[in-house]
Image (cartoon, rainbow, N blue to C red):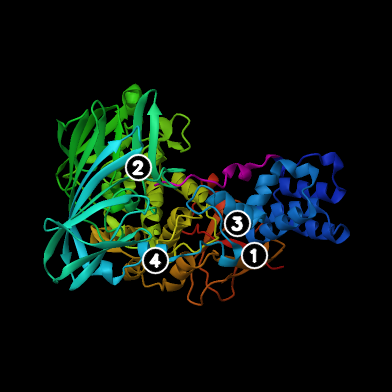
Amino acid sequence: MRFTPVIFLLFLFLDSFCVYGQEKRLPCVKKIVQSMEDWEFFEALEECNECLEDHPNSAEVYYQRGLVHFYLNHLWATAQDFEKVLSLGIPTSVLEEEEFLRWYGDTVFIIQAITDSLIFPTLKPELNYRKQTTMADTLQGMLRPERSCFDVTYEKLTFKVIPDARSIEGSNEITFKVLADTKIIQLDLYDYMEVLDITWNGRSVPYTRKFNAIFISFDAVLESGNDYTIKVSYKGSPREAPDPPWNGGFVWKKNGDRHFVGVSCEHLGASSWWPNKDHLSDKPDSMEIFILAPTGYDVVSNGNLVSETADQNGYSRFHWHVSYPINNYNVTFYMGDFVNFNENYVNRKNQNVNIDYYVLAENLERAKTYYSGTKQIILAFENLFGPYPFPKDGLAFVESPYAGMEHQSAIAIGGDYGKDSIYDMVGIYDLLVIHEAAHEWWGNSVAIGDMADVWINEGFATYSEHLFIESEFGKEKYFKAVGENMFEISNIWPMVGLRNVNDNAFVGQDVYYKGAAMLHCLRAIMNNDAAFFRMIKEFYTTATMKISTSADFVAHSAKYTPIDLNGFFEVFMHQSAPPTLEYSFDLSEGNLKFNYRWVGVPENFQMPFLLVINWGLTHRVECTPDWNSVSFQGVQDFYVFSQGDCTETDLDLKNAFTYFFSKYVP
């Protein structure tokens, strides 16, 4: 799943530094603006402070100082100045920039903007803008004894789609191995779905429901080491998605007078529409999916189509088989009027892999152009990470009635094939396809057992976009993508979420953007691309088809560098605030002494930053929480390179372009 950017980069290119209505401005403000236009930001900062001494309640001057701080990457200071502007009242001269002010100076505005489409739109400050967790969250997110006592090995899901009623009905046969003797197990199905019956060995068994959990009681002990099968029959009208895929559920659309149906349910949970053990730590090893749909429609699901047969009463039966372990939230289907085209490629294990495309008939020609680079994307990821992980099931991209979602071997692609797409195009490649394809490696093969670690899925998939851009278009485009990505980081919540409560770690988007930035910064810290790429590939190899945690990645990374990374991971994973570079300097007669240290970080934190001298000479500077200094001669100008500088650059960035905020201490 690729999150829609919300912090728009157009703010980086404010025309003439937002100079509107200069004829009404204070003379000192005009002087400040001129200094900024001349790129004399430290001089402009001094002028702002002098101007505020004479005009202490001028919102206009606070705005200009906030803008100076913004261009110097002093984003905490920017937030303070913009907050002051909002409290004093936005001056007429900058009313057009109200949204820009609020993105950097109004925490409540930011939080509301990035959560209004998610499952919980109202977050309270007394809870640090987190959702109040409940017993229902614990029942869904925790491995209680009733769950940890068994391991699901196989599922046979059968359901009938009734689009006119917007309902489904069916059953799931679940085969599991008992890991600890028990008489009770927990399955899951949202409480708006009706359980018709639960059978074991041909007879009904009693159960109770609590919130969305089903506790099944057996009259005999299920013994450790043995395999058992139960069948849950159910029906109901599943939740309709308010904003899929981020706020998930069923999507019932019409294409003309024809039905166009799909479902996406990551975080919401697969139990929102079918009964299962709905915990990320447990995947069935394989699966059969039988879908009954009105005759005349095509149905696509995960894995391979085994058969399509006429059923009865105007329905057809589609049988799909999944050969590999699969996350429950990846189980899906699409019902519509599809046409299919395909291509084949040979992977790094010399296996033939089929790539299928299922699109609405009217989009066939556009889709062929849109997907023309898919094979190159897959081959690039194979070179970076390893062979495509699901060769028997092939790979499919399916036109969906919502934006993209990484359903295993049946990836959902919305966005109208790049036309009016919200996603950037990179040559012939749409970032949506690149991102969702990367999830076959990160999220579908390398999987997580708790939503707290979802950055592993999304951070790696987002960083995979950058690595693909680097492989196809070079280092300069890579750095541009990395820099633009950094401006999307919200820094409101820690990237690693709360455990055992099915936390919505997507909120704030940092699992995407800070996750990718962390991987990029790790590459800079290691300063050894061969070791970095070996580390990534071997993490994938050791974790494929397994459950991984943030701690697993931290431990794995330590094997590839002598540098202590614990402080770095503590900041990027578990703190909401980024590292802050505190600095001072003395520039006199061409001699620069630059003093620096990291603040707001553990004692063992270390990360380089990039210092640019005379607009072209780049210097990689190692930095820790201890004050240090570096000196240069013949200096006319200098600046600390940050994300804003990286939107366009041909500088040698020396594995030293990293993510941080700055604080100038004169």
Horizontal arrangement in the rendering, residue 271 relative to residue 601 (left or right): left
Give the crowd class for mark 4: few <14, some 14-19, many >=20 residues within 10 Å.
some
Determine contact: label 2, label 1, CB under 8 Å. no
Identify which amino acid the numbered label 1 is placed on.
Answer: Lys
Give the crowd class for mark 2: few <14, some 14-19, many >=20 residues within 10 Å.
many
Q: Residue at x 47, y 76 (%)?
A: 604
Determine contact: label 3, label 4, CB under 8 Å. no
Give the crowd class for mark 1: few <14, some 14-19, many >=20 residues within 10 Å.
many
Residue 510 in picture, x, y percent from top left: 48, 56
User: Which element type, helix, strand or loop, lies under badge 4?
Assistant: helix
SS majority, magenta: loop
Which residues make up the magenta segment? Answer: 1-15
Residue 567 in picture, x, y percent from top left: 46, 72
Q: Residue at x 35, y 29 (%)?
A: 259
User: Which element type, helix, strand or loop, lies under badge 3?
Assistant: strand
Residue that badge 1 annotates: 663
Q: Earlier in the sequence, mark 2 or mark 1?
A: 2
Residue that badge 4 annotates: 138
Residue that badge 2 annotates: 263
